Image (spheres, helix red, strand yellow):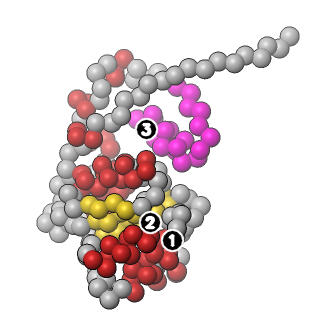
């Protein structure tokens, strides 16, 4: 005698208060770098913006490779973060075009944001000027430490530095609870596992 059961529930999650993310202290070499980020997914762009503003106030976010090329023609940046799966002009095409611009500063570093399937650090990426790749989902510690390493600094940030007072009121009452995470998107699942695991 088998029963077909169906159930549903709703969980309310609070949006992280990004004002509690303190600006990360770097030495003078990278504390005020100018960063151009190109990401066409609005949710990822919002997360990236809050993370990047922890590093420097000098952040510009765009949503296409074409916009990035136009922006680089007008302004210079120390660091580029480019989504490898842009809808209009892909990462390598964008980097090659940016690198060919007359006003491109050859000391500009570039990081690709990968969803695991679309890019790897091959000869073509290196020739296009890519310095490093970060896999999505992007976490603050990975982003900060990758940027630190590009500028010759050691890892300088870990998630374990988060203060207990930054957790929501009553958080200790659920610590250790068993939780089932059902997510069919591999990237969101990885993010959930990491965040819930802590």
Query: Would you say 71 lies left or right of 137 here?
Result: left
User: Of tags 3 and 1, which is closer to the observer?
Assistant: 1
Q: Is the magenta stretch mostly helix, strand or loop?
A: helix
- Residue at 45%, 81% in the rendered image: 96
How far from the left and from the top, in percent, is residue 133?
Answer: 45, 65
Question: Is the residue 111 above or below the residue 3 in the image?
Answer: below
Where is residue 19, by image quadrant? top left
Label ID, residue 119: none
Q: Which image quadrant: the N terminus?
A: top right
Q: Distance between the residues labelled 2 and 3?
A: 29 Å
Question: Is the residue 193 above or below the residue 54 in the image?
Answer: above
Q: Which image quadrant: the C terminus?
A: top left
User: Of tags 2 and 3, which is closer to the observer?
Assistant: 2
- 1 and 2 marks in contact (CB < 8 Å): yes
Task: Determine the secondary structure under disc 1.
Answer: loop
Q: Mark 2 points at which residue?
A: 64
Q: Name the residue under label 1.
A: 89
- Residue at 37%, 48% in the rendered image: 47
Where is residue 182, by image quadrant? top right
Q: Mark 3 points at which residue?
A: 195
Q: Mark 3 or mark 1, which has the lower sequence index?
A: 1
Query: Badge 3 local density, few (<14 within 10 Å), some, or many (20+)?
Result: few
Number of on-image labels:
3
Provide the residue span drawn in magenta.
Answer: 179-198
Q: Mark 1 or mark 2, which has the lower sequence index?
A: 2
- Residue at 25%, 75% in the rendered image: 75
- Residue at 21%, 58% in the rendered image: 56
Q: Distance between the residues labelled 1 and 2?
A: 7 Å
How far from the left and from the top, in percent, is residue 22?
Answer: 20, 45
Farthest bottom residue? 102
């Amino acid at each position: 005698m088998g029963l077909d059961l169906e159930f549903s529930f709703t969980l309310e999650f609070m949006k992280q208060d990004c004002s509690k993310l303190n600006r990360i202290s770097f030495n003078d070499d990278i504390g005020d770098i100018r960063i151009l980020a190109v990401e066409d997914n609005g949710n990822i762009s919002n997360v990236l913006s809050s993370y990047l503003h922890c590093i420097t106030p000098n952040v510009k976010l765009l949503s296409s490779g074409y916009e990035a090329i136009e922006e680089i023609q007008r302004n210079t940046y120390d660091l580029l973060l480019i989504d490898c799966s842009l809808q209009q002009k892909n990462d390598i095409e964008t980097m090659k075009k940016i690198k060919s611009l007359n006003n491109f500063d050859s000391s500009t570093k570039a990081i690709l944001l990968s969803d695991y399937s679309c890019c790897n650090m091959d000869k073509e990426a290196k020739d296009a000027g890519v310095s490093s790749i970060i896999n999505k989902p992007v976490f603050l510690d990975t982003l900060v430490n990758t940027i630190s390493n590009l500028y010759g600094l050691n890892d300088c940030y870990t998630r374990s530095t988060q203060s207990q007072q930054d957790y929501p009121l009553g958080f200790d009452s659920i610590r250790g609870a068993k939780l089932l995470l059902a997510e069919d998107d591999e990237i969101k699942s990885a993010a959930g596992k990491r965040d819930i695991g802590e």
